[in-house]
Image: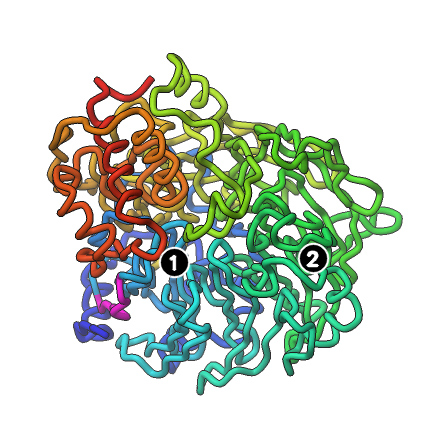
Amino acid sequence: MKTLHFAAAAISGLLLAACNSPTETPDVDTPPAPETFANVTAERLLNARETPAEWLTYGGTYDEQRHSLLTSIDQTNVADLGVAWTYDLATARGVESTPIVVDGTMYVTSAWSVVYALDAKTGEELWIYDPDVDRSVGVNACCDVVNRGVAVWEGKLYVGVIDGRLEALDAKTGELLWSQVTVDQSRAYTITGAPRLVDGKVLIGNGGAEFAVRGYLSAYDVDTGDMVWRFYTTPNSSKQPDGAASDAAFESIGNVTWGDTGAWTSDGGGGTVWDSIVYDTENDSVIFGVGNGSPWNQRIRDPALGDNLFLSSIVAVDADTGAYKWHFQTTPGDNWDYTATQTIILADLPLGEGGADRRIVMQAPKNGFFYVLDAQTGEFLSGDAFVPLNWATGLDEAGRPIETPEARAGNAAFFQSPGPLGAHNWHPMAFNPDLNLAYIPAQEIPRAYSDSSSEALAGTKWNTGYDFAAGTAVELPPGTLQALRATLKGRLIAWDPIARVARWTVEHENAWNGGVLSTAGGLVFQGKLSGEFVAYDAATGDRLWGWDVKSGAASGPGTYAIDGEQYVTITTGWGSAYGLVAGIAFDDPLPPMVGKVVTFKLGGTGEIADADLPMIDRSPKADVFGDAAMQTAGLQHFQRNCAVCHGELVLSTGVLPDLRWSDYAASSELWASVVSDGVLSANGMVSFSDTLSSEQLEAIRAYVLSQAHIPGAPD
């Protein structure tokens, strides 16, 4: 690992003293400095709502409402926001981190799980920790090599590393204190989510359900890294006890929902807990969301076609032991990558008897329905579609989807909405408890699911069970891309969970959305794919302010105060699943971008530097070769093996190289050295010799060059 130190405490103190203005009038009390640096305790987290000058945990508080009580920035003055400072995260890959701010220090992560400690008032770098990830593990990351942030507890900082490690650092110096491998690293597990801290335990899940793994949530001792408990989300292949907290749940309700054959018995079944984890303080429960099945296609995963618990479910367990309490499955027998890992929010709403407050759980998962559950029992209270969808006509009285027959129609391709990117993805949702509005970063990104024989997909690294090469052609009919782009929509929805309707909606120019921050100043902040950071009126959706942050702004924003002055901050960086695959969504190539931390304050006069990256030479490096049959075969192999990183139909957004303009495409020998021999493994481009033959490699090259010679973007 690499740790760079800059006498953090001394420098921080000097900078704070030098930048403190005696004319500022605090409207928020800054908590007194504790005896121990970053001494975030259980009591401090329990009372985080009452100390809004800090941002102590991923969702702001244990309830994860992402609603701040700070009011210095409000509807009357938000137009005066300007840049306070920026910090260059030195990456051109995806950035999804929500900044944590404690004791005047900001902690953020960027691509490859690198951790930064910054002075929260000035942006001055204090230290950097690089976990030295082997870049070849990037091939296991379905959705870019991102990281959503850290957790802090009693002077220690915790980060999940993309290769499956959970690490504890000294929050003041960045020194590594302990490192624990949480996964079987011989399988394609990753970690992209932020850890959570509950009473001396650090909670972490994992990702990888696209690549044949078995999901679980684990709790580790904060001081030693020893595992305290683990809850598996799918049974093991023999349906026998694991000696884990989940054993009783599978024996009583889980095992019977799985057959005895199918790909799950070797692949693990999926169900990774890759994002949402919340602590319900009233019921002493950890509530978490569970991901998709592996493979997605249930016919291949489990021919018995049962509900497959606990895929696509919200699960509650005892915080101390991990013992099962309740579950609610949003998509029984998941067949489409409809994860339930999206933001889970806890709140008290007047949904009890006689209008009394009731502790509830809210989620807007991928499948397009907004759910309200009882937090103590998991009882289904309501569920309503928040976007147009065609895979189901509604929910029954128990909350079970009423599926349309076409959604499981087998070999007939069905253009389904939502597609696998979902009606809401990882982007954090927020909730204003004064207005009782949930703010959903929603999207419409449909997809044609085409069932496939296992032979057609044999050897592909992605374990979906669907053939996403079906229906594509080397030469598309005129207007095809324009028609596809018209189906891609993004919006911010203010959802009323009591009235069960959208109170207001803002339409975006791009489908992929940004995370949301709500404040007591009557504001909602959201970033956009275009790089615009915007503030809306929380009650009406009226646009009040906007700023070009010069890179994709998808992360969850945060806010904090130092010396009575409120700041609003966001990490930027263009990448993630949409950034890798969605070149078809754009008429023109995107310019090179870099990730940054961008922090605003009233009257800020700073500037955001343009990306100092060279433009790509967008010209083909060799002539077209091969006949139509060869190029068509290349298209199919590209779509099945390469499109998830290099863009559908070889249309890259620039996060990873656009192969049409690659020098390696000029020569079969150079091409094979990369794709077959893995000479660029250190950059994340591993060998595909185990999945693609030399003939298939050359067919892909023929297809890539055929697309390079189309004038402009394919129509």
State which quarter of the image contains the N terminus.
bottom left
The 10 Å Cα crowd at callout 2, few under 14, some 14 to 19, many 20 or more, is many
Asked if residue 522 can be seen in this view, the reply is no
Q: Which residue is mark 1?
A: 140
Image: 580 above or below 70:
above
Residue 562 badge: none
Asked if residue 243 can be seen in this view, the reply is yes
Q: Nearer the viewer, residue 503 or 704?
A: 704
Q: Nearer the viewer, residue 1 or 639?
A: 639
Apparent side of residue 427 relative to residue 702 in the rendered image (left or right): right
Q: Secondary structure at mark 1?
A: helix
Region of the chain picked out in magenta, as a range? 126-135
Amino acid on which disc 1 is placed: Asn
**Image x and y of residue 389, in percent:** 64, 30
At 30% from the left and 80% from the top, the residue drawn is 176
Q: Secondary structure at mark 2?
A: loop
Q: Which residue is mark 2?
A: 308
**Image x and y of residue 480, in percent:** 41, 18
